Image: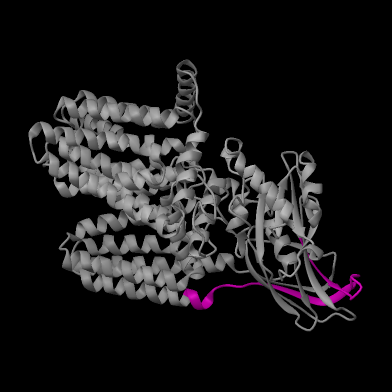
Amino acid sequence: MKAVKERITCILFVLIFLLVIAGINVIGYYDRTFYDCSHEISFSLNRGVYRVTLDEAASADAYRVYYEVNGQERILAQGDVENNAFEITLPSNIRNDSVRVTAVTEEGTNVERFDAVRITKVLPVGRTVAYLAMYLVIAALIYAGFRGRREVAALLGAVSVAMPPLYPVFCVAPVQMACLLVAGTALLFAADRKLKIEAKSIARYVFFLALSFAALYFCTESSPLYARNRWDDAGIYYSIGKGIVHGYVPYRDMFDHKGPVVFFIFALGYLLTPDFFYGVYLLESLCLSGLLYFSYKIARLYFDEGIAETLAVISILFFLDGSLLVYGGSCEEFTMVIYAAVLYQYLFCLSGQKECTGRRMAALGVLCGLSFWMKFTMTVCLLALAGILLWQELLNRRRFVRKLAAFAGGGLAVSAAVIGYFIGADAIGSFKRSYFDANLAYADVRGIGETMAVFGKNVMTAVTTNPGITLVVLTGIVGFTVSSRYIKGITGRLGLLAAFALLVGSTYVSHAYLYYYCLVAVFAILGIVTLAGILTERIKRLEKWRGCAYFAAIPCLFLLFAFNQNYKDAAPLSENFTLLDVFQKEMERVADGRERTLLLYHNHWAQMMTFPGVLPAERYYFAPNISENVPEINEEQDRYIHEGIADFVIVDNVEIYPHITEWGLYQYEQILDWQTDRYSVQLYYKKDEYRGTED
């Protein structure tokens, strides 16, 4: 009877998965024919690739597809009469019936009527079949490999939940995704048979991974639900990661002042899905699953498995709050898993569980090194936690020197890899000036009184922006500091309090950006554990509550969907092209297949660098926030204009820079002027007479 129930459950998971994928394609299907058309007929289209087929019109020499946005009508695509079928790619929606097709003569006049226009959405039929076949093979392997064990249904269910968000990723990068899925399946069996990890532990992590894919599909704009991540910082990281793949060296060839680790993360994301943010979404999901796993491990120190799993699921509401996650892809978001891992090791060793081994200290060193080379101010809290652990080892006389050497060795190993890369690329000087000198120049130097006033204002901003999470975080800090139930010794409790104070101090001493709160939010797991401890003391039957995590996941996802604002403001529900989409289409049209090097003059519309075929014109291809503190940036950008280095130039409010027209902008032709109530942006293309022999 048990085997039959197991088989039926697994079959249901497979059928539901197949229905979901079929439903996605049915919803996305679009095939419409306009008969007896004139150039005045217009319609709307959603994001995607479309094939336009037209009947031959008398006296026509070409076909053009126009769209209207921001009061301007622009050319979306065009084709010759001899080849009356062509494709158009829409990175965002075009709504409000603002698309129209015309047949034009050689002189450019419209042909009044033509017989028919057919617009068909191009669906990835072949790749869909391949994806379904791969899923069925993976499902069969899991069922055969774990059959008879109670975890097989949970494991197959988690895999079935994880794979629908990966379907659009597979469609744009089938080879990379096939390799990842095969490798992931192999890891499942290696963990079960080679590493002898319990099946329930494997199922638990796959469940966390599936939950991460599902949650971030809506909560980060790097996911396939969105055209691209709108955030300037994410665009900068992506552009430099893309540059690394194309042979550029960070800092030497493409400037920014963030640490190199985040650029390597985005380079890996670009390798996974070239010209899409989806690879970054995969890495964000992987980090979130690790964050949930360590949240479970922290809760497991004090509760049984069922409660610990449930608390980990509930914690996702605090980790993915829209006010601190922003659009997704920040350094702080990727570092959250590092904070959770270090916090777990700290509590594991000081809650009376086991001795802090040399291997654990080496792992802490590696984690601190990764954090340091992403953003060094984020490492202060981690070093404090590691320092308390080492101090405890010194007091207990447990091989302190060996463990200190292990910790230092882990950090130095990461540093050697990073520094060695820049030495090998002959860019160590650029690395130093960009990461250390530029960040120090960006730091505000104030007196003690002014510093404390700014700090207090920043902390109040963080608290008022995230009042609920702050209350839970403070509850946890108080609970873990006061009660000996969680940390045995007074040194460990005071050390946790000091480390948290250092985190707040180092984070908010200068600025109060929303995404800074990601690291503070990690400590919410302590508040969740504290509140759960109070509940389990009052309601004893909660101690044996099992399986609740799977049921808690659904309402948590719905709550995230309700709280998160990204999907409401971005591509899925937007009414029209964004400024970036318009710029990209104009650059494609004018360049006509030629190289597109871009200069963002005195601005950081860095999302433009995320489009296919767009490369940086020079090292200072954009103007970061620190350009006021580093005069070299603006001076070099003026030189680029003077020498006509870039193929395209984007300028904010060109009228406030009258000198650049005579200085070098005369070499360029303005091809777009975007005026709104909020901003004025102009796009320029280098005139053919000034291109010399470049082409």
Task: Out of 425 and 17, give the one closest to the viewer.
Answer: 425
The mark tally for this picture is 0
Task: Out of 434 and 39, give the one closest to the viewer.
Answer: 434
Residue at 61% across / 48% down in the picture? 622
**Residue 590: horizontal and vertical position, in percent?**
75, 65
**Residue 182: horizontal and vertical position, in percent?**
34, 72
Q: Measured along the vertical axis of the image, is residue 126 above or below residue 368?
A: below
117 sits left or right of 377 in the view: right
Residue at 30% across / 47% down in the picture? 367
Specify the segment rendered in magenta.
99-128
Quadrant housing residue 310: top left
388 sits left or right of 42 in the view: left
Residue at 51% across / 34% down in the picture? 441
Q: Is residue 28 magenta?
A: no
**Residue 621: horizontal and vertical position, in percent?**
61, 52
**Residue 538: horizontal and vertical position, in percent?**
20, 29
Task: Out of 593 and 401, give the one closest to the viewer.
Answer: 401
**Farthest residue toward the bottom?**
82
